[in-house]
Image (cartoon, rainbow, N blue to C red):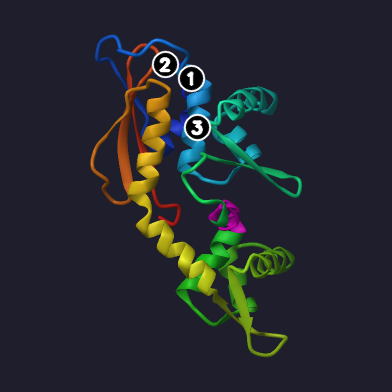
Amino acid sequence: MASPSVALALRRALDVESVSLGRPLRRAGPAWLLNPRRLEIVLAAAAYPGIHLRSASRLLLSPLPSLQFHLRRLEEQRLIKRVRVQDRVHLFIPGMFPPSMEPFLIALQDPIDRSILEAIRARPGTVQSDLLSSAGTSPPDVDRAIRSLVSLRAIRRAGMEPNPRLHVTAAWKAFETRCETGEEQRLRRFLSLLESQSLNPAAQAIEDHRARISVDGPKSRVRFVLPLNPLR
């Protein structure tokens, strides 16, 4: 991935750098991820599982028509997975997370949903009125988010209306556990995807729920840091 084409936002988020280490060695055959934009899309979906398509467009500084063109090619090669929820499209790397985890991962990509979940985790039994300051938004938005999270079975209400107390569910706690314990498996899956594209990936040890990975770019090795736990 040539450095001028790397989106600045993604560089900062994933600590991307190009390192001249001589001409990369590859097997013969097509490598779809040698296209810089496609590699950027895959990195974004791996780092932010469930990222909304428009959020990816802003992050990568890429107009939607161009992004959708590359997404079609990546989807054809099973290098990216699109999940539609109502009128929104979310991006995943196939196999990094089981489908049962995808609704919770999508919720984490919504800033209001995430702030509410974090507040309830920090203060189990909190009431809706106490969430306004932590969510930093309007009462209708908080009400919408709570109804959505209850529908997802991420949180539950306990006690009498109009101020029931809110708790995360057993399903959410199980999701948290899988996020914590599945880091090495997710790293292996992502390295396998990169290897299938003849990018010769190499990963250093996991540290602080992140792995530093290097791959072959068109002209040099590219290093980046990949978050492995979406809760961190």
Q: Residue at x 50, y 66 (%)?
A: 118
Q: Residue at x 41, y 26 (%)?
A: 196
Q: Amino acid at mark 1?
A: Pro
Report helix, strand or loop for mark 2. loop
Q: Is residue 163 above or below residue 99?
A: below
Left or right of 8 in this view: 132: right
Considering the whole magenta stretch, tell me its main secondary structure. helix
Residue 42: image tag: 3
Residue at the disc numbered 1: 36
Q: Residue at x 52, y 45 (%)?
A: 49
Give the foreground label among 1 and 3: 3
Q: Are marks 3 and 2 in contact (CB under 8 Å)?
A: no
Q: What whole-number distance in Å separates the C-alpha atoms at marks 1 and 3?
A: 10 Å
Residue 125: x, y in percent?
54, 82
Residue 63: x, y in percent?
66, 26
Give the foreground label among 3 and 2: 3
Residue 2: image tag: 2
Towards the viewer: 13 or 179? 179
- Decide: few, some or many residues near mark 1? Use Cα within 10 Å; few <14, some 14-19, many ≥20: some
Q: Is residue 207 above or below residue 5?
A: below
Q: Quadrant of residue 129?
A: bottom right
Report helix, strand or loop for mark 3. helix
Towards the viewer: 193 or 119? 193
Specify which label sits upstream in the sequence, 1 or 3. 1
- Decide: few, some or many residues near mark 2? Use Cα within 10 Å; few <14, some 14-19, many ≥20: some
Residues in magenta, as a range = 101-112
Report helix, strand or loop for mark 1. helix
Q: In which quadrant is the C terminus drawn? A: bottom left
Q: Is residue 50 above or below residue 79?
A: below
Specify which label sits upstream in the sequence, 3 or 2. 2
Is residue 227 visible in this depiction of the protein?
A: no
